[in-house]
Image (cartoon, coloured by chain):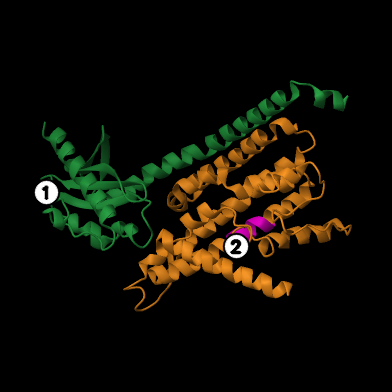
Chain colours: A orange, B green
């Protein structure tokens, strides 16, 4: 939470990125809704730009099924926690705000994992420990502290959706590259989409292993950075 | 009035307590809905796996940790769950034995090994190797047994082999008594 220190001296909503100052506009709330939503997907993409939540990103992007499952989970938890935290923001005493956030986030995550266990057992098993660990995913606490605790319920929901979708898109891009190169085939929820001849018999196992994740994330970050640099010039 | 409540020293404690109580109630509600589904599913899954190993099974009963398989009222075999820890977490394996204590079939119930590498322990090409073996043959080929390890996944393969071997000796001991 890099912007923790800004809390006292600014009432404006801020993006997590210290260099990008958020410009407040007085347009209608519906246009702000879409703005907050779009923001999370590209200009403050949690993985490639903000570099938040890298631990689960490295760990679960070895298959696209995991990526979609984790993405859906994070969207759900973000939406629940942002909406709840935003709706009680005026009553929350600053002294206990972090414990309150954590309790709300942990409750959403536990509900999510109970639902996954009951209705999507294969996904529940393959996400393993990373599902309960969503509690400590810094994206979620970060959005609670930086956004939901200062903005209206509607905007907080938009922020949650935007950041959640941005996270999911990042996971899907990384896992697509890793699964196709690392196993030579693509499987979604147990159904095989295609199998590349040659690559599937001698897959580049390196890409499915953790070092492969670092490599792919690094290249993707460089690409996003390059796009950012070109755009700003 | 509002400011009076907010500035009260006990207010943060009460507020946190209320949040915790609401969360607990919510979780109890969700858990009471999902836990019977989860339980049902586990029983159903074991039943299906047993049926895939013993197609002739008419019914089964659970005695301590051994599943006794009946075919038309007669004992047709046994099954048990072995678990070991692999490269990425616990591996649970259902092992079926015929009446002569040779392996009838092996099926991986749950695993969290690396997809595409260690997860290949669930493939038939690996699990079929166990068919017909007795407890003394169950070891990797490099360690004097009859099981080929999966390329690049020696740890996962060894975890399965060791778990089955250890539990099988135990189970046969208790069955023979």
Mark 2 burial class by Cα count in 10 Å: few <14, some 14-19, many 20+: many
Say whether residue B54 is visible. Answer: no
Which chain does tag 1 point to? Answer: B
Q: Point out which mark residue A214 bears.
A: none
Give the answer, above or below, for where B32 lies relative to B124: above
The percent coordinates of residue B34 (x first, y second) are 51, 40
Asked if residue A187 shows in the view, the reply is yes
Quadrant in which residue A7 is drawn:
top right
Residue A168 drawn in magenta: yes
Instruction: Give the residue pinned by disc 2.
Output: A48
Across and down, in percent, residue A227 comes to: 65, 73
Which residue is at the front of the view, A107 or B81?
A107
Q: In which quarter of the image is the C terminus of chain A?
A: bottom right
| Residue at image location 57% in from the left, 51% down from the top | A73
**Main SS of residues in magenta:** helix
Q: Are marks 2 and 1 in contact (CB under 8 Å)?
A: no
Which residues make up the magenta segment?
A162-169
Work out how far the residue at label 2 is from the one at label 1, CA to CA, in angstroms. 53 Å
Q: In the rendered structure, does residue B71 fall within the stretch colored magenta? A: no
Identify which residue is drawn at 51% across, 43% down.
A132
Q: Which residue is drawn at 75% across and 31% down?
A: A93
Horizontal arrangement in the rendering, residue A123 relative to residue A222 (left or right): left
- The residue drawn where x is 31% and y is 57% is B122
| Mark 1 neighbour density, 10 Å: few (under 14) some (14–19) many (20 or more) | some
Disc 2, SS: loop
- Residue A52 percent location from the top left of the image: 59, 54
User: Residue A44 location, x and y as percent?
Assistant: 68, 60
Would residue A54 appear left or right of B8 to someone viewing this image? left
Which residue does the numbered mark 1 point to in the structure image? B134
Q: Spot the residue most to the bottom.
A: A197
Judged left or right of residue B129, residue A146 is right
Which image quadrant for residue A18?
Answer: bottom right
């Amino acid at each position: 939470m890099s912007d923790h220190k800004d809390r006292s001296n600014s009432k404006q909503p801020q993006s997590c990125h210290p260099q990008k100052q958020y410009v407040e506009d007085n347009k209608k709330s519906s246009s702000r809704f879409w703005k907050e939503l779009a923001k999370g997907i590209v200009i403050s993409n949690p993985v490639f730009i903000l570099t938040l939540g890298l631990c689960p990103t490295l760990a679960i992007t070895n298959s696209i099924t995991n990526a979609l499952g984790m993405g859906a989970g994070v969207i759900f938890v973000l939406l629940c926690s942002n909406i709840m935290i935003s709706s009680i923001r005026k009553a929350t005493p600053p002294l206990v705000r972090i414990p309150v956030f954590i309790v709300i986030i942990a409750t959403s995550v536990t509900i999510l994992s109970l639902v996954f266990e009951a209705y999507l057992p294969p996904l529940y098993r393959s996400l393993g420990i990373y599902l309960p660990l969503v509690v400590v995913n810094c994206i979620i606490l970060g959005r609670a502290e930086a956004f939901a605790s200062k903005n209206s319920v509607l905007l907080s929901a938009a922020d949650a959706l935007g950041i959640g979708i941005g996270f999911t898109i990042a996971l899907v891009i990384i896992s697509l590259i890793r699964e196709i190169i690392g196993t030579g085939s693509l499987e979604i929820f147990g159904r095989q989409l295609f199998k590349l001849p040659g690559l599937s018999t001698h897959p580049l196992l390196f890409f499915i292993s953790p070092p492969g994740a670092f490599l792919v994330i690094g290249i993707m970050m460089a690409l996003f950075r390059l796009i950012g640099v070109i755009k700003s010039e | 009035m509002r400011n009076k409540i907010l500035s009260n020293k006990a207010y943060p404690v009460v507020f946190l307590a209320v949040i915790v109580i609401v969360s607990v109630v919510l979780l109890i509600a969700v858990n009471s809905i999902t836990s019977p589904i989860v339980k049902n599913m586990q029983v159903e899954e074991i039943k299906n796996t047993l049926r895939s190993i013993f197609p002739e099974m008419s019914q089964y009963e659970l005695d301590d940790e051994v599943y006794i398989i009946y075919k038309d009222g007669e004992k047709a075999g046994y099954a048990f769950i072995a678990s070991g820890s692999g490269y990425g977490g616990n591996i649970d394996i259902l092992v079926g034995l015929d009446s002569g204590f040779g392996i009838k079939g092996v099926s991986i119930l749950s695993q969290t090994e690396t997809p595409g590498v260690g997860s290949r322990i669930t493939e038939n090409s690996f699990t079929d190797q166990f068919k017909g073996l007795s407890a003394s043959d169950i070891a990797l080929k490099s360690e004097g047994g009859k099981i080929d390890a999966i390329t690049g996944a020696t740890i996962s393969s060894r975890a399965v082999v060791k778990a089955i071997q250890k539990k099988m000796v135990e189970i046969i001991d208790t069955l023979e008594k």
